[in-house]
Image: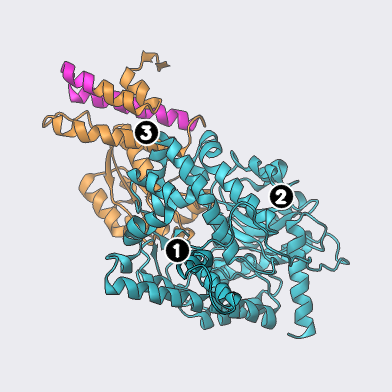
Chain colours: A cyan, B orange
Amino acid sequence: MTQELEGLYSERLGRYQAAIALEPTDRVPIAPGSNYFAEVYSGNTNQETLYDPAKWVEGELEFVRAFPETDVLRDNRLWGPQLDAIGLRSYKLPGRDLAARDQFQFVEREYMMADEYNLLIADPLEFMFERWFPRILGEYERPGSRRSYMAFLKSGMAQGMYAQIMRDRSIRLQEVAGMPQPMTGAFVAPFDVLADTLRGLTGAIMDCFRQPDKVVAACDRLVEEMANFALRTADPLKRYPIFVPTHKPCFLSPDQFDRFYWPSFKKVLEILIGAGYKVRAYLEGDWSAHWHHMLELPKGSVLCDIDNQGDIFRAKRDIGHHQCLAGGIQDSQFILGTTDQIREQVKRLCESVGVGGGFIISGGCNIPYTTKPENYRAMIEATLEFGTYDASLRPMPKQTVGPTIVDAFDYPKKMTPWTAKKQELGGAVPGDERLIQRPWDDLEAMAYAWLWQWTM
Amino acid sequence: METGGVRMHPIAQALRDLDEPTVNRLIDEELERGTSPLELVTHLNDGMVAVGRLFAEDEYFISQLIFSAEILKGVMLRLEPLLLEGDEAERGGCVVIGTVKGDIHDIGKNIVATLLRGSGFDVVDMGVDVPADKFVEAVREGGAKAVCLSALLNVTYPEMKNVVETFERSGLRDQVEIVIGGAPINEQVREFAGADFYAPDAVAGVELCKKIYG
């Protein structure tokens, strides 16, 4: 990496990190999380983003050349072949199920039945292998068949390939374009696990009324699973926040949120923050009845993206003194609006939400695919014009590296840890145990994380 | 509780309060007593209207709308076989509803459809990923005066416009009013699409249909 690019990388990362921590920096960061526009700007199809990593990264490098003021570009996309290998049924993918330029879509169904809570709570792995996987993983429809074994084998290999692809991409974006990531690693809130990929929204809501205690117990049981998955997929250097999209709070009443959603979600957030990470949370839909809870977490620990339906000006009053906010421009403004409208909106945002820092310019949890390029450009120009705090400041990244300490459970989680295996071998091995234990436990932890990714 | 000066039937109250066991018990009792299923449907509809009102007043959230719809669905499964031929309640206006082509999300669309039925509308639910000409066909067949278009994805703005233009080309545009709604929809999108109304939430959508048929 040239010195210039290294400087650019440091400056962008430092700016982003300062905003998240509510600390002074030179200007409002231009740091959208899900920049769909960047994926297709070069003319790439949505299928190419998910199936052709080389084309994806080249396309986004073209985007960076056109919009170099952008501060981050993301890494955390699905990789089509990995989903194909296991036959994941919860997504429709462009090129496979949809036209190549269509947007991927989530298919919500009842993959868990209303009477299966006890099993999920008592033994999540038993629940997964016996009930859930055969329903949600098409290639595992007949457990024990040759095809089901091959599917696991292929998908395990695909996971290794996928990790390598994302690592290479991250390094390439950093070295060729000086570009940091908006987030690395992901999880969903325990209630969203239930309401997305297990019971579906309608099922989960029925359960809140018909068997509320089971819902609470299941969410509690999922806390360590989600924290484990998040930490396993996070940036080991802790430069970037961990991503959490929150899907179902906008459907819940404040009482329901307080009872079913927040307690377990908060526990996961506390584990991640305690382990030295920041979190980037998409507050999807209208979170205004719930977002005051973000005040319960340490200041500057959760970057909150405000969606199209949320009022970011109100969010600034309610929680903006405690957590960084991102957003402010409506999907419809990017897609249908004029450059003058964008400029006016950015000015308004910088002069209110931007005051005192802790603000990142973005859309409502995304930059739409069909954004007019001149509108994205107008957002940048207006941010530079109205969002500059102190041009003499030179942002620098924080020292984030440190051990990942988890008190809540034995991290990283494994199904058959070495200690159990050693007992099977008679309690001792004749040679150097460490040479066996480390890779055994590493592979166990990798496989364990693989099991839970299908809840995303 | 009084609604419009008329005391609500206990079934309507129980549905309004989302008290599923009580709704089911009262339905059993009434059926045993020989009350006509049609009358029970009227009480259930009153209950759904009350739920919609609580939502409009910010007392209820979407989860409560969804649960009320599920309670209703369960009861209707029992009542429908009992309804006699020609025993239909006075039919309200016909509304065609669907999620536009390119989008398979149906949560919002389903809530609106249930609330519309609860308000006495004759609902033609076209499902998801519905091509523009299918909406036109449905209007031609059913004579609906209101068409509700739903979407969750922001890539559907041009498709909303396409539906409106397809109605124009078909010659039916003057006979229908088009309501659009869904998470990424707002007044700016309505203007772009050339729709008649934008519904900020499910209950607003029902109110617009009432207005159209008013």
Point 39% across, 26% down: residue: B16
The kind of residue tagged 2 is: Gln
Q: Earlier in the sequence, mark 2 or mark 1?
A: 2
C-alpha separation, residue under disc 2 versus residue under disc 3: 36 Å
Q: Are marks 2 and 3 on the same chain?
A: no
Q: Residue furthest bottom?
A: A2
Frontmost residue, A294 versus A446: A446
Name the residue beneath numbered marker 3. B68
The kind of residue tagged 1 is: Leu
Name the residue beneath numbered marker 1. A451
The main secondary structure of the magenta stretch is helix
Q: Where is residue A287 in the image (x, y as percent from the top left)?
A: 58, 44
Q: Would you say the residues marked 2 and 1 are in contact, meaning their CB atoms lie under 8 Å apart? A: no
Q: From the image, state whether disc 2 or disc 1 is nearer to you.
A: 1
In the rendered view of the protein, which quadrant contains the C terminus of chain B?
top left
- Asked if one can make out residue A345 in the rendered structure from this viewpoint, the answer is no
Name the residue beneath numbered marker 2. A323
Q: Where is residue A381 in the image (x, y as percent from the top left)?
A: 72, 66
Magenta stretch? B28-57
Image check: B81 left or right of A381?
Answer: left
Q: Do labels 2 and 1 share a chain?
A: yes
Q: Quick check: A319 above or below A19? A: above
Question: Could you say which quadrant of the image residue B212 lies in?
Answer: top left
SS state under label 3: helix
Q: From the image, state whether disc 3 or disc 1 is nearer to you.
A: 1
C-alpha separation, residue under disc 2 versus residue under disc 1: 32 Å
Q: Is residue A454 magenta?
A: no
Q: Where is residue A134 in the image (x, y as percent from the top left)?
A: 32, 61
Q: Which chain carries label 1?
A: A
Q: Position of residue A390 (x, y in %)?
A: 86, 62
